[in-house]
Amino acid sequence: MNFWGIINLKLLLDVLFAVGFGLLLFSRVKEQRTLWLLRGYLFLVSSAWFIQRYAYLPLTSKLIDAVVLACSLSLAILWQGELRRLMELLGTGRLAVLLGNPPKEFRATSTTLTQLVDTAGKLSQNRRGALIVVDLGSDLRPEDFLYSGTKIEAQLSTDLLINLFATDTPLHDGAVLVKGNKIISAGVILPLSRQGISRYGTRHLAALGITERFDRCICIVVSEETGTLSLANQGKLERPITSSRLQELLMNLIGNQNSTGTSKSSLSKNVLSQKASTNDNIIDNINEKESNKSEIFTKKKD
């Protein structure tokens, strides 16, 4: 009697752990097609386990095992980036990031939002290339980059960010890492993405690469050629965007997590709207000039 009780207890714990692991996977998957694939794969695994444990069907069991193995290899190829990130997080012991519980000290404030929008607008106006990584809770560490850059550990400010991306400085080609209201490092070399290699430049591929591996960080990109703004988030790039659109996106990603009071937020919104309107006019003029150049080139070509 005790023997069967121990067996039933092990079976119950086995089912509970499997269900918990499945719920964890479902909570981390946000794309609908990926969710369908995961559901189908877990259904096959559950069917194989049930048949092997409760039904004596050797031929059916072999067939399902072969299908599960083929699906496992296919998913390993499709999800190689996600699996690599999972192993990196497990190897470094960052379970809080894996479970989606970011530390509060890595969250940015409304002041950070104001300075980021202001910096991006001025850099866009001067057509100065820039790459700003904002850590929202991924706990980015030096080993997460190809090169960790130079430590800055300074208070975030618009003037300092602009100076870091000056063309006559050795750090302007790399990215700047921002955590909370501090600039952690500059001249950081990010891993490149494999998607859109023929469409995007190095800065945009680097922004996609870091946000693919860490979903709780965003990356602001300023093109050196055209001055257009872009924002990378969770491996997706929105471009080109204006300063007002950048302000809206950052408010959704940063501002909602760090509301420091109604009066302060309303004040920051007014300041941002004024700066954004000025930057939008400048960017619109740049885009209009680029479109005129393309029309002239097309007419000459025709």
Image: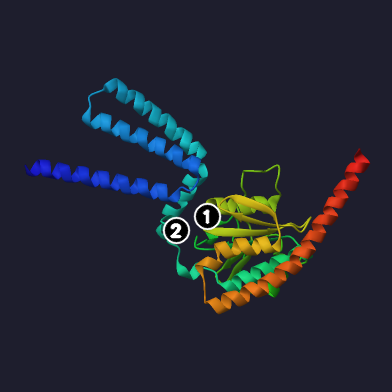
Closer to us: 209 or 171: 209
- Looking at the rendered structure, the kind of residue marked 2 is Val
Q: Answer above or below: position of 82 versus 42.
A: below
Q: Secondary structure at mark 1?
A: loop
Query: Distance between the Cα atoms at labels 2 and 1?
Result: 9 Å
The image quarter containing residue 95 is bottom left
Give the numbered dot on residue 265.
Answer: none
The residue depicted at 36 percent of the width and 45 percent of the height is 22
Which quadrant does the N terminus fall into?
top left
Residue shown at the point (66%, 43%) measured from the top left: 196
Residue 32, position in %: x, y? 49, 43
Q: Secondary structure at mark 2?
A: helix
Residue situated furthest top in the rendering: 59
Q: Mark 1 = which residue?
A: 214
Q: Is residue 274 left or right of residue 193?
A: right
Is 116 positioned to the left or the right of 50 in the image?
Answer: right
**Marker disc for residue 97:** 2
Picture quadrant of residue 224: bottom right
* Residue occupying image coordinates x 48% and y 70%: 105
In the rendered image, residue 154, in percent from the top left (x then y), is placed at 60, 75
> Can you give x and y, in whole percent of width and height, for residue 263 in the image?
56, 79
In terms of sequence position, does the residue under pointer 2 or pointer 1 come before the other? 2
User: In the displayed image of the protein, which residue is found farthest to the bottom?
Assistant: 263
- Asked whether disc 2 touches disc 1, contact meaning CB atoms under 8 Å apart, the reply is yes
Residue 45 x, y percent position in the rendering: 34, 35
Closer to the camera in the image, 99 or 118: 118
- Residue at coordinates 33% horizontally, 24% vertically from top-left? 62
Would you say residue 88 is visible in this rendering?
yes
The amino acid type of the residue labelled 1 equals: Phe
